[in-house]
């Protein structure tokens, strides 16, 4: 049991780590040569460009202005200054609503912490259970603040019961208001949005095979018959997966060519050579520049052939199409209705934005989809409950003895005691650590295998898988030590009413563990996020080896984006911890509040200056967020019930039974009230936008506007890209903010002190 | 433990009872004065009418033709003769698909029984567990045929495992084929259906209040804007609940007037008198004829006033309307899309047939609906698990001692030993029996309270409630003796893996009980159904006291209908029993097969000759039926797993784990493949029908056709009714069957031997 002093030491260490990261960030971001790492968003928007060459060479690399270093934390208020509406304009609704999750955390937990400290802590403190009964075991002060300090059967539990109700109702209130708010923001965003191809377009999948007509003709005839007055045009989908691969390969080999050419330039005496086998480790040694030049020639030829083949071969046409309509009204109707008797053919759904489409999955037929879903469900079950077994196996292989056996030449080094103990200490954890790092990628692959057709749904589906994994393996796994599989068999052999009791009983004892977890994973983790170590290193590597032109430099930039599939489930863990411990060990709440504040500021800064989102789903993820907080509430209520029943609070415990029922009812109510705004498109809104548009632009050529909107990225010509960029530029609204002197960014109207 | 002999005796008794009922039915149905009880369907269709008065008075009442009595079982083949297509024409798709449930039972269980007897019974019979191990307890022959006779840990369990897989797959096959078949029948029925108002009409609920416009104007404006080219007309809904009550009261009092007038006619010496208090038991004594005449006058006046008020008072208009469109396409679109941002306003849904509408619930707002659903869910939970408590309380009141105390004048009679023992034997059961009889009514009231707006959905919702109740209280309640509440607390305190073991273990021992149950409830119950004792008595009572004109006689007829909310859940119990015992005690299967055959014949007869369905939902209930059989399969698989694990079949049991997963996957697959045919209306079908209609009847005045289709029944004028009947008559297709000499019904082309 950790005392307050222990926690204080741990907090100190973590605060110092976080401060170290922040100082490093503050210094690094001021250096002009890091500008593209820490402010890529502004480069992408075209507002900021590389320092002009008229300034001195040193000043282009290092910032020598001492004043900049004094205001080392000025980015924080700067990050908070941009108003929400401008932020939506700047970074999209997804990012803004994502930030609101942190605000929801604060709205829930600040009042909870206040009342818990004002009411529960004094009641717990004077409970005297730990002093009187168990003198032989030493308890920490934290436990004296927790529910453990109340004597079994005491009538003080009524206070906890009342607070559990109050906390639940307050959480309901916050969630309800927030759902209403986000719904309103989404609808307003959709209304004020400029014209976008996806508003008029429906994705049609599983078009049946017709022996007499091509896919394109068949689609046209079908929709001319069934939506006679509304059908406008359509675009067929090519299976360009092979072509995309060739393009990708060409790009990689091109990069290598540039790299070797640069090497040769620097050292003209020796022509660079490399091995052509796996990862350049073995195989024939060739002259690198000649080899890659010939490879690129070959690929260029192959690519041209494939491009022709795809365009001509009817087999390259996938039985799917993007069908566009004259009005938003007609598109909304087509997307929400069934077209034919057979519900597995002519499946219509909203088309996602062109950049959001996941092209690879467009051709999977209905039958395979259900089958794939079964496979993914089963394998996810095994992944969650049995993931420890392969890791244990790897660990058993990777111990010192087997290394010594297989690589006997390492023996002398390994046998040095210090190194041996380090290896023995690290090795067992490494396999697990690697697994946890690649886990989101595995889950994303599973979601891709399921056949989802847009990046946004892929992100959402992966997030819900990751959430379940974290819930079972991190939350429950930390409380009941042992693997998830052990838990599973334990649960199966325990009675249903014993399980909450068992978990509830251990909950108070794990408080200090979770406090440390919050500090390490939350505080230091968020500080690490702002430092962007990996993109920093990668950028400078690319910059020194591959970048020749300004365009190369632009491509070397990696703004990244909010990784919703990883960040959101992790965030949910904090909600769960906060809600579970609010009534049990209120001492944990301030740590969570600090996390939410800190993470909010950091992510707001990143969203303004760094991230460039891959798509815009108009906050389509909010129902998931809401749902998961509801799950956290229910878990906290059940665990409190279990805990109180072990405490013999027989009078008050049964009254807790109503809480989960109320929570479920609240969830159903919210679903009915708000969810449709995220899944349907009201006809009234569509009509309104259509009418307005007709009045404003009566001569708009919709057909031309839509004709090339949904085209596979590899077919996009250079002109197309330029067109799009132009269009994008037009939409940019110059910022109207008054002051941004503290943020070292150049907006259209203002220039700051750093870049001369 | 019952032996085969005991079962034989029980079977004998029940067969005799059933035969008794059948003989009574065979005799009673031949008597012309019962004709309207046993053949009401034909009267309603207008094909049969009361015997003409030219025949002798006796022959009108009693059938003296001895030949009719010889062919006493001829109704059976007759019931099977009508081909399915004609039956759909005659009784609607609902009835035909309902009959298919029995056929599904036969398709599943006949092959199951065959293979179980060919493979499992010999394996069980030679198992020798019961002979060798437990000589002290006497086991019956039935147990020797069951899985109990296999020694623990025997490798013979592989046979049961394989058969469990084979049975499941066969059931999947039958269910899949049947789902496909019913889907096809439904779609074909919808296509070939004549023009009906509900095809063009959408029910709009929760129309918001507008201070400037009346509901009618608001609806018209809204749909003219949002469905500009498609909106045709609408009908507002009046809150005529009070008016309907007045009409009902007037009718009842009119009946009493007729009754007393008849009494006075037969006995002119004494004017009849009655008390006006509760049920005529107390209150002032009045002259009956004068009293009812004045009452009817008063009610007629009140009714006229109310009728005027409803038509004029804007407050009597409910915020709901039936909105009709020009085409089926437009109606399908409006029903399946959301109209405005706020998903709780302007709710659109398919309008049900006019006769299917449940008018009372049309005015409930959205907020109340979710709240009512919560209340019903909670009260249904308590009803299911705690229903025994009030019954025990009533039983404690209704014992002999308390009767003696309260009604001491009965003392001498009660104290007679025979009577005392009868009362003591009957009393405890009576409260329970009454409860079980009124249970479906209670469940229907709950469903009505939930706010469903059509009779068909009310029936379906009540059926699923009743199914859950039967599952928990009859099936599990019989296996684990004790109330459902005891089970609940037992389950909560048992481990999750112990529950199936516990139940599985007792399953084989309960086989004889369930065999008896099938014979009493199934065989004798079905035979009782065909006898129609209650309608028989009611008809003759009404006929002798109330009937004066031919029209009165028509109203006295009570054809009834398939009570889907009661019959279907009961039927599901047989599926469950069959599936559970197929691998455990195959001896039970023949009893179930006999039940399905017998019930199929009886209900087919009833559907042809008796029932008159209240609505036509085009087999909308099939997904529920399918779903419940799936639940039965999963229960049977889990129980078999539990049973096998207590039998120490450690090698084979884990392989059973895949079965429930497969079953759930099969269910998801079927849902995706077929369910949409029951919830959506494909646009292609709508367009096809619209185009055909336009070509056939280009000058059809749709507006007039729809203008009075959805009008509250109390506002229907006599002319309307006649119109409808005329239209109904037009649709009747003369039967083309060749022979119906055995069924004593008159079709248009044939007259049979009974009615001269």
Image (cartoon, coloured by chain):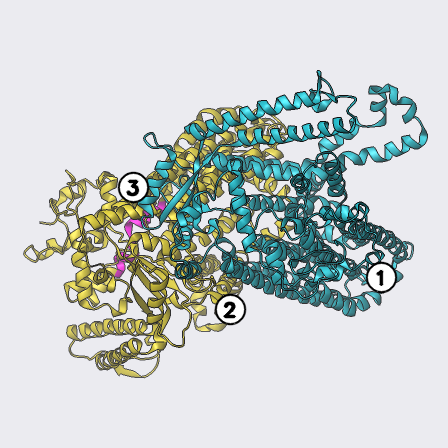
Chain colours: A yellow, B cyan
Which chain is mark 1 on? B
Q: Which x, y percent locates residue A749?
A: 11, 45
In the image, is residue A97 above or below residue A43?
Answer: above
The image shows residue A365, relative to residue B39, as above or below, that is: below
**Marks 1 and 3, how far apart at CA:** 75 Å
Does residue B499 appear left or right of residue A610 in this picture? Answer: right
Residue B328 is marked as none
| Rendering quarter of residue A240 | bottom left
Q: Which residue is mark 2?
A: A402
Tell me which segment is drawn in magenta. Answer: A524-538
Magenta segment, principal secondary structure? helix
Q: Is residue B284 above or below residue B734?
A: above
Residue under the point 41% across and 46% down: B704
Badge 1 element: helix
| Secondary structure under the numbered disc 3 in the rendered image | helix
Q: 10 Å neighbourhood of mark 3: few (<14), some, or many (≥20)?
A: many
**Counting other residues with Cα less than 10 Å from the Cα at mark 2, is it few (<14), some (14-19), or many (20 or more)?**
few
Q: Residue at label 1?
A: B144
Mark in the foreground, 1 or 2: 1
- Of marks 1 and 3, the one in the foreground: 1
The secondary element bearing badge 2 is classed as helix
Give whichever of discs 2 and 3 has the lower sequence position: 2
Residue at 18% across, 59% down: A725
Q: How many marks?
A: 3
| Residues at marks 2 and 3, CA–CA distance in whole angstroms | 48 Å
Name the disc covering residue A601, or none. Answer: 3
The answer to whether marks 2 and 3 sit on the same chain is: yes
Classed neighbour count for the residue bearing mark 1: other residues with Cα under 10 Å, few (<14), some (14–19), many (≥20): many
């Amino acid at each position: 049991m950790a005392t307050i002093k222990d926690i204080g030491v741990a907090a100190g260490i973590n605060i110092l780590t976080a401060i170290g990261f922040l100082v490093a960030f503050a210094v690094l971001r001021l250096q002009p040569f890091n500008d593209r790492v820490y402010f890529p968003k502004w480069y992408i928007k075209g507002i900021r460009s590389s320092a002009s060459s008229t300034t001195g060479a040193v000043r282009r690399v290092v910032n020598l202005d001492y004043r900049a270093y004094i205001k080392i934390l000025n980015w924080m208020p700067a990050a908070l200054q941009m108003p929400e509406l401008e932020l939506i304009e700047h970074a999209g609704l997804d990012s803004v609503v994502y930030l609101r999750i942190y605000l929801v955390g604060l709205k829930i937990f600040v009042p909870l912490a206040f009342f818990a400290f004002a009411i529960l802590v004094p009641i717990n403190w004077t409970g005297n259970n730990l002093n009187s009964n168990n003198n032989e075991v030493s308890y920490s002060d934290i436990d004296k603040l927790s529910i453990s300090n109340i004597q079994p059967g005491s009538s003080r539990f009524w206070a906890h019961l009342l607070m559990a109700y109050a906390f639940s109702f307050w959480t309901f209130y916050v969630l309800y208001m927030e759902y209403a708010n986000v719904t309103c923001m989404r609808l307003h965003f959709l209304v004020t949005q400029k014209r976008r191809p996806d508003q008029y377009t429906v994705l049609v999948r599983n078009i049946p095979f017709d022996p007499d007509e091509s896919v394109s003709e068949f689609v046209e005839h079908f929709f001319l018959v069934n939506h006679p007055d509304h059908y406008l045009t359509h675009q067929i989908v090519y299976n360009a997966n092979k072509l995309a691969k060739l393009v990708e390969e060409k790009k990689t080999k091109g990069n290598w060519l540039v790299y070797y050419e640069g090497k040769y330039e620097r050292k003209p005496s020796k022509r660079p050579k490399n091995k052509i086998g796996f990862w350049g480790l073995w195989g024939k040694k060739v002259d690198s520049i000649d080899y890659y030049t010939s490879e690129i020639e070959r690929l260029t030829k192959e690519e041209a052939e494939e491009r022709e083949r795809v365009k001509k071969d009817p087999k390259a046409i996938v039985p799917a199409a993007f069908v566009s309509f004259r009005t938003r009204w007609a598109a909304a109707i087509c997307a929400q209705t069934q077209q034919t008797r057979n519900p597995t053919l002519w499946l219509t759904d909203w088309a996602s934005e062109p950049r959001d489409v996941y092209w690879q999955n467009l051709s999977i037929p209905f039958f395979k989809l259900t089958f794939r879903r079964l496979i993914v469900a089963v394998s996810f079950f095994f992944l969650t409950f049995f993931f420890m077994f392969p890791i244990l196996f790897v660990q058993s292989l990777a111990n010192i003895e087997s290394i010594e056996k297989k690589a006997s030449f390492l023996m002398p080094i390994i046998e040095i005691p210090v190194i041996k103990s380090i290896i023995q200490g690290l090795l067992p954890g490494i396999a697990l650590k690697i697994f946890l790092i690649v886990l989101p990628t595995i889950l994303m692959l599973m979601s891709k295998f399921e056949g989802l057709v847009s990046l946004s749904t892929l992100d959402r589906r992966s997030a819900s898988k990751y959430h379940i994994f974290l819930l079972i393996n991190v939350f429950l796994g930390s409380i009941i030590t042992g693997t998830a599989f052990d838990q599973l068999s334990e649960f199966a052999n325990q009675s249903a009413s014993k399980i909450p009791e068992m978990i509830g009983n251990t909950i108070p004892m794990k408080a200090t563990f979770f406090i440390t977890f919050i500090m390490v994973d939350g505080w230091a983790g968020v500080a690490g996020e702002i430092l962007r170590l990996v993109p920093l290193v990668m950028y400078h590597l690319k910059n020194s080896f591959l970048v020749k032109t300004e365009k190369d430099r632009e491509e070397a930039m990696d703004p990244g984006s909010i990784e919703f599939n990883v960040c959101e489930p992790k965030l949910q863990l904090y909600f769960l911890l906060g809600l579970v411990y609010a009534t049990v060990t209120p001492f944990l709440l301030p740590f969570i509040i600090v996390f939410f504040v800190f993470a909010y500021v950091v992510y707001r800064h990143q969203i303004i200056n760094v991230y460039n989102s891959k798509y815009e789903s108009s906050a389509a993820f909010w129902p998931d967020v809401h749902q998961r907080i509801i799950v956290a509430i229910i878990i906290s209520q059940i665990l409190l019930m279990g805990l109180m029943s072990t405490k013999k609070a027989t009078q008050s415990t049964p009254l807790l039974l109503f809480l989960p029922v109320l929570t479920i009812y609240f969830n159903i109510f919210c679903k009915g009230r708000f969810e449709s705004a995220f899944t349907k498109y009201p006809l009234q809104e569509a009509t309104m936008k259509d009418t307005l548009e007709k009045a404003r632009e009566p001569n708009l050529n919709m057909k031309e506007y839509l004709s090339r909107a949904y085209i596979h990225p590899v077919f996009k010509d250079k002109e197309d890209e330029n067109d799009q960029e132009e269009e994008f530029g037009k939409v940019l609204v110059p910022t109207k903010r008054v002051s941004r002197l503290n943020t070292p960014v150049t907006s259209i109207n203002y220039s700051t002190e750093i870049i001369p």
